[in-house]
């Protein structure tokens, strides 16, 4: 059985995603929210705490609880994890991009939200310090991103674009990291020596509703950069 | 100026670390805590929320706020990030271990808590599926870990040991990940081919007081494993 606080949290998320509760909107008090759902103040608080922890709500001291102004700024750079030796964030720049629509593989359909028949596959080469150093393959379910292949070149940072245009707000991702040696084709593509140490990053990205909205395979020749994360 | 909620949070942490507020202890209400520190209920709530998010306190629905029973179970495996292809957690097993006491380098002294003159350096080789696949160097400030080099072989999972014996509770770590190719010495040490793709993981670990208590360099031959993380 779904606990009541979960139901309240899910319902609030739906209202936020639908726009019924817009960014910056001040929520009623915990007591009032509890009453609305026939729950205790403690249960309402638990729901709000969860949404606060996920960055969907913001509590402002002495003022109340608000729908987060926008996850835009956060998501713009939060998922770019490359850093240089001094800890500065490195954002790979676009070099080439290709978008195709194709049938989803069984593995893709089984994990992506809505068990999509078709997916968009975006392939990008990106530059780091002017050199081709990143290769990305991004898989999106067609139903969530209608017309994506008719928009011309996409933004460098895709998550703010997903949110603005499609109302899909990525807030969490699981990643698998593996070192490997560059193969022959990749060496040509990224203009580096075969056997160069590379970092493979396989990402499963979820939106604020917990739906798997994107699969992404990134391949980095990190040179003197590193991939920076925080474990909590 | 330190905001009041920060001061309340820091003071609560001190009381928890000192044992004045033991694991499982139920805290007074937000209103009472506020009164104790001459702060509003909202300010007290903000302090509690922060400690809850850091896993130091636990709110139980309809019952109150409690000092987390123990970070033991969490920390026992939370920082082991290797997974096999099916997502199962892989815990490298001990093979060899060496502990020395030496003068801290300038870089170590400047980042470790207390600017230590001396550090312990633990060097370990660890086994994955029975093969030597991980090399670790762990640097600890001597003042926080007195007598560490006189205890014989240490536990495989060090963080629960730090907490139990030295009251040092690691809850957060920044990591830098870099792929590289195994060098000649490493190839001998880990019984693998020179040039094998490796993952270097450099960790800066902090305890619940935010002190940098450990530096760790891990080197993994991941084979068919990967390093699994979640970005939020």
Image (tube, coloured by chain):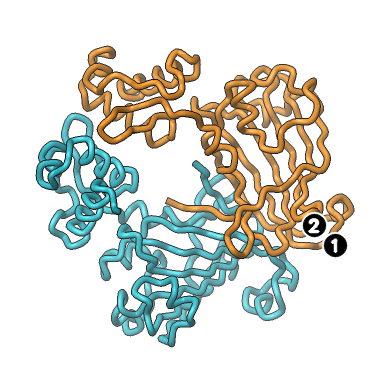
Chain colours: A cyan, B orange
Are the residues at dot 1 and dot 2 in contact (C-beta closer than 8 Å)? yes
- Tag 1 secondary structure: loop
Give the number of the disc on residue A171.
Answer: none
Residue occupying the point 56% across, 72% down? A135
Residue occupying the point 39% across, 19% down? B12
Residue A25 placement (x, y as % from top left) = 14, 48
Which image quadrant is residue A116 in?
A: bottom left
The residue carrying mark 2 is B182
Residue B230 placement (x, y as % from top left) = 49, 53
Residue occupying the point 56% across, 37% down? B75
Q: Is residue B220 left or right of residue A202?
A: right
The residue carrying mark 1 is B193
Q: Is residue A121 above or below residue A40?
A: below
Q: Is residue B102 visible?
A: no
Taking the view exactly as shown, the residue that stands out farthest to the front is A1
Q: Residues within 10 Å of mark 1 (few under 14, many from 20)?
A: some
Q: Is residue B193 above or below residue B107?
A: below
Which image quadrant is residue B123 in?
A: top right
Residue A84 placement (x, y as % from top left) = 58, 50
Q: Is residue B172 above or below residue A95?
A: above
- The chain holding disc 1 is B
Residue occupying the point 46% across, 52% down? B231
Q: Is residue A72 visible?
A: yes
Q: Is residue A202 left or right of residue B49?
A: right
Which image quadrant is residue B116 in?
A: top right
Residue A131 placement (x, y as % from top left) = 59, 68
Give whichever of discs 1 and 2 has the lower sequence position.
2
- Tag 2 secondary structure: loop
Q: Residues within 10 Å of mark 2 (few under 14, many from 20)?
A: many
């Amino acid at each position: 059985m779904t606990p009541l606080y979960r139901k309240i949290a899910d319902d609030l998320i739906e209202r936020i995603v639908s726009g019924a509760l817009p960014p910056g909107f001040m929520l009623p008090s915990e007591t009032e929210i509890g009453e609305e759902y026939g729950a205790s103040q403690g249960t309402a608080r638990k729901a709000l705490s969860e949404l606060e922890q996920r960055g969907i709500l913001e509590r402002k001291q002495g003022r109340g609880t608000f729908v987060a102004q926008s996850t835009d700024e956060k998501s713009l750079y939060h998922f770019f994890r490359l850093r240089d030796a001094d800890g500065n964030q490195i954002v790979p720049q676009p070099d080439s991009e290709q978008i195709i629509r194709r049938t989803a593989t069984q593995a893709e359909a089984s994990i992506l939200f809505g068990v999509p028949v078709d997916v968009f596959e975006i392939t990008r080469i990106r530059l780091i310090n002017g050199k081709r150093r990143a290769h990305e393959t991004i898989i999106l379910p067609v139903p969530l991103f209608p017309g994506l292949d008719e928009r011309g070149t996409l933004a460098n940072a895709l998550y703010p674009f997903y949110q603005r245009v499609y109302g899909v707000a990525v807030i969490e991702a699981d990643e698998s990291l593996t070192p490997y040696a560059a193969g022959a084709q990749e060496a040509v593509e990224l203009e580096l020596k075969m056997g160069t140490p590379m970092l493979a990053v396989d990402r499963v990205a979820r939106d604020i509703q917990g739906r798997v909205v994107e699969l992404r395979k990134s391949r980095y020749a990190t040179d003197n950069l590193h991939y920076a994360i925080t474990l909590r």
